[in-house]
Image (cartoon, rainbow, N blue to C red):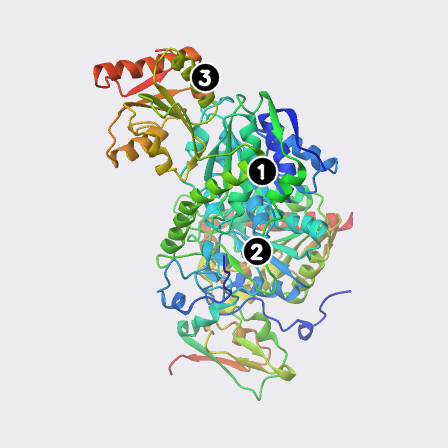
Amino acid sequence: MAFVKTIKDIPKEEYLAPGHRLCAGCGAAIAIRLALKALRGPTVIVNATGCIEVATTIYPYTSWRVPWIHVAFENAAAVASGVTEAFRIMEKKYGVKRPDVIAIGGDGGTFDIGLQALSGALERGHKMLYICYDNEAYMNTGIQRSGATPRGAATTTSPAGRVIPGKLERKKDLVEIAAAHGIPYAATASIAYPIDYINKVRKALEVDGPTFIHVLTPCVPGWRIDPSQTINIARLAVDTLVFPVYEVDNGKYRINVMVKRPKPLEEYIKPQGRFKHLLLPENKWLLDKLKEDVRAKWERLLKLVNL
Amino acid sequence: MAEAKVLGLSGNEAVAYAVKQADVDVIAAYPITPQTIIVERLSEYVNNGELQAAFIPVESEHSALSTCVGAALTGARVFTATASQGLALMHEILHIASSLRTPIVMAVVNRALSAPINIHCDHSDIMNARDAGWVILFAENAQEAYDLTIQAFKVAESHDVLLPVTVNLDGFIISHSLEVVKVLSDEDVKRFLPRRDPVYPIDFERPTTYGPLALQDYFFEVKRQQADAIGRAKEVVRKVGEEYGKVSGRPYPLVKEYGMEDAEVAVVALGSSVGTLRAVARRLRKEGKKVGVLGLTLFRPLPRDELMKYLEGVKVLIVMDRAVSYGSTGGPLYLEVAGLLFRSDLRPLTLNVVYGLGGRDLRPSDVEAIFNEGFKCLERGRVEKELLWVGVRE
Amino acid sequence: MKEIFKMPESAFKGKATWKEIPIGGIIPEPATSLRYKTGSWRALRPVLDEKKCVRCLTCWVYCPEPAIERLEGDAVRINYDYCKGCGICANSCPVKAITMVEEGA
């Protein structure tokens, strides 16, 4: 039973207030705002250092309408573990009402520096949802490459230079890493498919255990796109198979947005300044590698769905 | 409900027993020698139903303290323990735990910081963290480790303080030595330490933002508040020490003294060495030597006035450091004390002794030699070598 | 310790002293960012033609601030106090009821 069926079903309550300093057109802002639409009761947010944390809480201004905690960069999952366990024991000992706990981290604070804390929390099986908003680089500190940066992308620490044309390494597959912990629910989501995304958040909150959602969030300055194109680019990522929208539900793989006629990767590449060097003939080899990454991931996913 | 009794406990076991009686809600810790017994005992208590707490076996010390911060913000009573490398690993969060005003209690079983890797006692681990904004207490033996752990919760959670507190016990020397420990009854502890009454706990009716970004316009004010709080902590530690004395018969002044009423040569130290120093001082007193010993139970905030009042009339003051401040002009405790003396009218001759690094024993013969050096300085009327390395093979 | 749940006015003028603000740098009042009008960031402003609007709420879903209010009957109203002029609303409107015009034009 899906929480929302159409846009009209989406609750009116806004748990993220405007007045925050995220960029005009920020994909992460959309991702957080939509995730909060799925709240089902008292909720605590634990936020890692990053764009969302910094831009929504510049003292004395805060955009949050729920209890919200920021401690450091790499420990959102650890802090959230403490919050959820404290409420669990206090419910037992003193009858305190137990809330939902959502840890939010960017790709930086999750894929890289935060991976240890995430892995520990998933292994220990705490009741919490971890949402990773992925803008594919350390955006808050100025667009440096992360483990989530896709192959070929230009960032400030993997610039498209004359000798090395961008990031040479492939993107880490975080949902697979999360799913490998055997958690009850892990999924990717897209802000271009808000109904699917909101339903996934709600579904995850209802699980009595650790859950993980990876949402791709285009970044206006980092991807060098026009601010009005955020949703279009997010949709193209799905349509070109760069970012499949799927879930791993107690180990069972399911593709939520089936792309029957995928668009060519070039359509995704062209509107983004961080990829435009890949269209040069001398970099075709790198573009081909990226295409291979996308193809291999999709083929593997299809196989896993059929298992 | 357990009665007051006398138990044979090691320092670690004494800490764990105190934590159990304090009825903590959340324990998040990662094992590291020589702290492991604390964590193991606590997990036994929880799994046997003797302690109703969430025991979270985190995957690193950094996560241990992070988890504790999250738990503390919910209003729960929180405990962790670590040593050496673990304390170093959680360093970033030490500062955050203090500035977010979380009343976490942490036992630090003092062990040398690497390299080389060493599992034995010195104070380099806690000295490395002395500016993080934690209240720092030192135990001299297992009894003090037990007593101070109970007091630590009361100090931390006091509305005048609301800062994390660390109870330090020397690695292996206190942590693993079996001693006679008098424990309070469960009832007495419960009365002394009722359920935590949190300030600004997570509240869904009044959603609060914890840990925002503060720019040049507000950071300084928050830090000023923090400095004010740790300053106030001294009085709270004193009051709690007195109150505890009424309940247990063992009062806890901020500074312990022996022979200071007429000491000419006095020594000041932290941790278990205070016991060794006192034992040798007793013997020397019988021989007519006017020696004195000061042991600081409270190190941060530094009990300035309490320490200074004992130094009137002292002619030679020897400060013992079980840690080095590389590149500085003395060990951590020496720098503090020398600084205090300069700002007063007192001008004893001062000596800094660095000893015991990496678990090198401080033998009674070493202590005698130190006191004798003090008397030599007194005769000479001056100090020849300000810094003495005692126990190292030159 | 007396807890306060309203930030002192002086805090929003950059004038609060260390004694006036709540401890630990916490902000015990929700949504104080409403006082910070990001509408001044705009270079382009969205203009809604209500006659064309089919009340699909697509613009409301995608606004990052959010600066689009959902009204009775699913009509929408742009809140120019916060709108940063990104243009996502105009871009995603299925009936092109929103056009971006130069701010100040």
Residue at position x 44%, y 56% from top?
B213
Residue lying farthest to the left in this orientation: B381
Q: Are marks 1 and 3 in contact (CB under 8 Å)?
A: no
Give the distance between the C-alpha atoms of the residues marked 3 and 2, in whole angstroms: 47 Å
Residue B237 located left or right of residue A174 = left
Front disc: 3 or 2: 3
Q: Amino acid at mark 3?
A: Ala
Question: Label 3: few (<14), some or many (≥20) within 10 Å?
Answer: some
Instruction: Return the residue at label 2.
Output: B201
Give the camera-side residue of A44 and B246.
B246
Percent position of residue B38, x then y: 61, 31
Residue B86 located left or right of residue B18 = left
Chain for numbered disc 1: B
Q: Amino acid at mark 1?
A: Val
Labels 1 and 3: the sequence-earlier one? 1
Question: Label 2: few (<14), some or many (≥20) within 10 Å?
Answer: some
Percent position of residue B350, x then y: 28, 24
Instruction: Return the residue at label 3.
Output: B279
> To which quarter of the image does residue B332 belong?
top left
Instruction: Return the residue at label 1.
Output: B247
Q: Secondary structure at mark 2?
A: loop
